[in-house]
Amino acid sequence: DAGVTQSPTHLIKTRGQQVTLRCSPISGHKSVSWYQQVLGQGPQFIFQYYEKEERGRGNFPDRFSARQFPNYSSELNVNALLLGDSALYLCASSLGPVKETQYFGPGTRLLVL
Amino acid sequence: QQPVQSPQAVILREGEDAVINCSSSKALYSVHWYRQKHGEAPVFLMILLKGGEQKGHEKISASFNEKKQQSSLYLTASQLSYSGTYFCGTIAGNTPLVFGKGTRLSVIA
């Protein structure tokens, strides 16, 4: 079975631009979570979606938004990019919300110049 | 609240053992262990649930002390392939998975 897939793998943007990152979960998984990982730190929780509904939101500004589609894939949008948004963005899928084991995708490396 | 991992970094020779600790100030429901190699995504190792037993995976095992809200990851007879950064993630109540800052493990020949 295919694992979690993310696109694009790398992205370079300039300050003020907007970016959309995409994630497809493992087949059968209904929950998708998004994490931001900066160099030398652990992944930091941004959002979790389950059955197309937001189930949790981390401490990130409103510039960050996400949604989940009927096929359980998900998009993460970041508006008005700042230099500090440069990071590895990880998507993780799980069977259910919150307490289930999460499996990570390869990530999208975003560089903001 | 972010769990605290120790040590921050450790260097081992092949065949040596290591213990990585993860502690929380909150009453935990579960502890999740991941390994991340440079430039790659975190890979799930194991999950320990409140009230559950010690888990094992080949030469990597872990325990969960509910009284102390601590988990330990045991790596025995380390191999070069064990190198990477180990993260513990914790769930308390209905909070999302919160990761520690990681422990960088380097295994040398």
Image: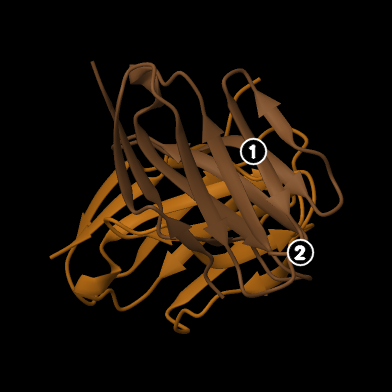
Chain colours: A orange, B brown
Instruction: Have a look at marks 1 and 2 and say if they share a chain.
Output: yes
Callout 1: SS: strand
Q: What amino acid type is highlighted by mark number 2?
A: Lys
Q: In the rendering, at what x and y percent does residue B107 appear? A: 30, 26
Distance from the alpha carbon under mark 1 to that under mark 2: 16 Å
Instruction: Give residue B97's position: percent from left, percent from top.
Output: 62, 61
Q: Which mark is on residue B25? A: none
Residue plotted at (50% across, 24% down): B76
Which picture quadrant has residue A63?
bottom left
Q: Residues within 10 Å of mark 2 (few under 14, many from 20)?
A: few
Picture disc at residue B62: 1
Label 1 CA crowd tier, 10 Å (few <14, some 14–19, many 20+): many
Quarter of the image where the C terminus of chain A is located: bottom left
- Residue situated in front as seen by the camera: A78 or B58: B58
Q: Residue at x 64, y 38 (%)?
A: B62
Q: Is residue B28 or residue A45 the one in the foreground?
A: B28
Of residue A59 and residue A69, the one placed in the foreground of this image is A59
Q: Quadrant of residue B74?
A: top right
* Amino acid type, label 1: Ala
Instruction: Give residue B16's position: percent from left, percent from top.
Output: 39, 23
Q: Kindly identify which chain the residue marked by label 1 belongs to.
A: B
Q: Looking at the figure, which quarter contains the N terminus of chain A?
A: top right
The structure residue drawn at horizontal position 58% and vertical position 36%, both measured from the top left corner, is B44
Q: Who's the residue at 87% across and 51% down the image?
A: B51
Q: Residue furthest bottom?
A: A62
Inspect this view and state whether residue A66 appears: yes
Mark 1 or mark 2: whose residue is earlier in sequence: 1
- The chain identifier of the residue carrying mark 2 reads B
Vertical side of B50 occupied by A95: above or below: above
From where the camera sits, is residue A104 visible?
no
Question: Which disc, if any, is residue B67?
Answer: 2
